[in-house]
Amino acid sequence: EPEVTQTPSHQVTQMGQEVILRCVPISNHLYFYWYRQILGQKVEFLVSFYNNEISEKSEIFDDQFSVERPDGSNFTLKIRSTKLEDSAMYFCASSGIVREKTQYFGPGTRLLVL
Amino acid sequence: LAKTTQPISMDSYEGQEVNITCSHNNIATNDYITWYQQFPSQGPRFIIQGYKTKVTNEVASLFIPADRKSSTLSLPRVSLSDTAVYYCLVGDMGGFKTIFGAGTRLFVKA
């Protein structure tokens, strides 16, 4: 069964550093998403991406965040200057073009900002 | 997306059937109802999705009454490994802001 994959599984960084989280969505999917989940809290939507542009973003997704689909398979989330409060699990998801657009999630990247 | 209301937590015993009900009074005509399961430190996992009446797959059943203002996820004969958080989401999920609520934390006991 096709899966969404994410790398790295864990990342530790210093405050102020840039991080790039990578995702490989399911191959025939066209909608891509990033979410985060702070430990013990609910899953929070960050951004959705379709046709090489952002279709929706939350208030969390400020100028420090950016997304990119640099090639036909990868989807990345960049945090330019990490803050302590960016420590969280980051999940990528993708969905196809069927009407229901069920989202399938990756295993996540655990980001720790020190 | 329609707002949803679910119980915060539920307890059950192995082998029992568990029903988790979600209220979504403001569901729109085009909205689907989708349930996800999440284990600690893992991504949400799709369980089942439906629009009306009843949907069944190898994992669960989803019951949706005619007015679609609520839905019930039914897990037959739960096991310890079904201990997880279950989320009900309502809406057209493609390309839109997807809002997860707090979910229902199911704890299955031996």
Image (cartoon, coloured by chain):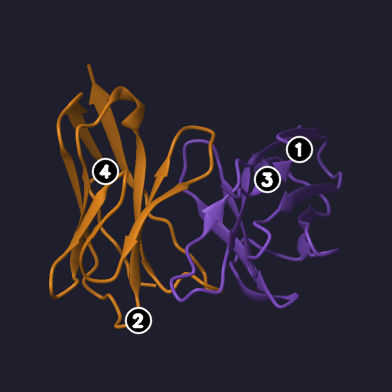
Chain colours: A purple, B orange
Type of amino acid at the residue the image marks with label 1: Pro
Q: Give the residue at mark 3.
A: A5
User: Label 2 neighbourhood size at 10 Å, few (<14), some (14-19), many (20+)?
Assistant: few
Could you give the CA–CA distance between mark 4 and mark 1, rounded to whole angstroms?
A: 32 Å
4 vs 2, front mark = 2
Chain hosting mark 2: B
- Name the image quarter holding the C terminus of chain B: top left
Image side of residue A40 versus residue B20, left or right: right
Q: Which of B18 and B106 is in front in this view?
A: B18
3 vs 1, front mark = 3
* Marks 4,3: beta carbons within 8 A: no
Type of amino acid at the residue the image marks with label 2: Asn
Could you give the CA–CA distance between mark 4 and mark 3, rounded to whole angstroms?
A: 30 Å
Dot 4 or dot 2, earlier in sequence:
4
Q: Which residue is drawn at 25% across and 26% down?
A: B108
Q: Give the residue at mark 1.
A: A8
Q: Which of A57 and B39 is in front in this view?
A: B39
Q: Residue at x 28, y 71 (%)?
A: B51
Judged from the image, the secondary structure of the residue bearing numbered disc 2 is loop
Chain hosting mark 4: B
Judged from the image, the secondary structure of the residue bearing numbered disc 1 is loop
In which quadrant of the rendered view does residue A12 lie? top right
Q: In the rendering, which numbered label is found on residue B30?
A: 2
Type of amino acid at the residue the image marks with label 4: Ile
Could you give the CA–CA distance between mark 3 and mark 1, rounded to whole angstroms?
A: 10 Å
Type of amino acid at the residue the image marks with label 3: Thr
Chain hosting mark 1: A
Could you give the CA–CA distance between mark 2 and mark 3, rounded to whole angstroms?
A: 30 Å
